[in-house]
Structures are given as structure tokens and as C-alpha cells.
Amino acid sequence: MDARGPKTPGGDALGEAAENLFQELQEHFQALTATLNLRVEEMGSRIEDLQKNVSELMVRAGIQNSVKEQVVFSREVQHTVHQYFMS
């Protein structure tokens, strides 16, 4: 007798099917995680580009604001968004 209990007809096939399903789910989850990470990085780059464009427009309009301040803020936003999606 097996330590898991008596064997049932089709039990091995069912266990194998469950194992295959679990493997498929794990692969899909990993692919989804990679896609989300890529999208978050792309969004971060877009935020930085947008911040630079806003800074340039502000300078042209005569509104002075530290570009360094804006870059720091942008990175904080990126970090917050990244943490949100990774938790």
C-alpha cells in the first residue's frame, strides 16, 4: 500500500493531468509577470519622457521649477507603481 492511500483506478492519470495543469498555470503566470514588468518599465520611461517635456514647456513659458526635483518625483512615482504591481 502507498503512503498516500490505496490506488484508485485512473488516479495516476488524474494526478498527471493535475500536474500538467499546474505546470501550464505556472508558465502562464510567469509569462504574465514578465509582461507586467515590461509594461511597468515602459510606463516608467514614458513618465520620465513626459516629465522632461513638461519641464521644457515650463522653461519656455517662463515658469522655473527644478528639473532635478521633477526627475526625483518621477522616479518616486515609478517606484510606487512598480511596488504596487509587484505586491
Image (cartoon, rainbow, N blue to C red):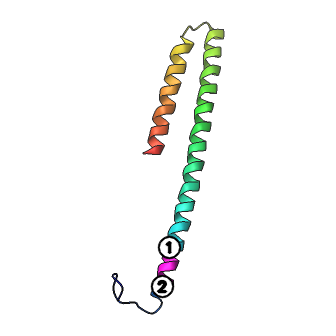
Mark 1 element type: helix
Which SS does the magenta portion mostly show?
Answer: helix
Label 2 crowd bin: few (<14), some (14–19), many (20+), radius 10 Å:
few
Q: In which quarter of the image is the N terminus?
A: bottom left
Q: In which quarter of the image is residue 54?
A: top right
Residue visible at 57% across and 8% down?
Answer: 63
Q: Three-letter amino acid code at disc 1?
A: Glu
Tell me: 59 left or right of 78.
right
Tell me: 52 left or right of 12.
right
Residue 52 on the magenta span: no
Asked if the residues shown at circle 2 and circle 1 are in contact, with their CB atoms under 8 angstroms apart, the answer is no
Tell me: 46 left or right of 81.
right
Mark 2 element type: helix
Nearer to me, 48 or 60? 48
Q: Where is residue 34 in the image (x, y as percent from the top left)?
A: 58, 49
Residue 16 on the magenta span: yes
Question: Which mark sits nearer the N-terminus, 2 or 1?
Answer: 2
Q: Give the range drawn in magenta.
A: 13-18
Nearer to me, 46 or 37? 37
Label 1 crowd bin: few (<14), some (14–19), many (20+), radius 10 Å:
few
Q: Where is residue 83 in the image (x, y as percent from the top left)?
A: 45, 39
Residue visible at 45% across and 86% down?
Answer: 11
Residue visible at 51% across and 79% down?
Answer: 16
Q: Position of residue 40 (x, y in %)?
A: 56, 40
Residue picked out by circle 1: 19
Which label is found at residue 12? 2
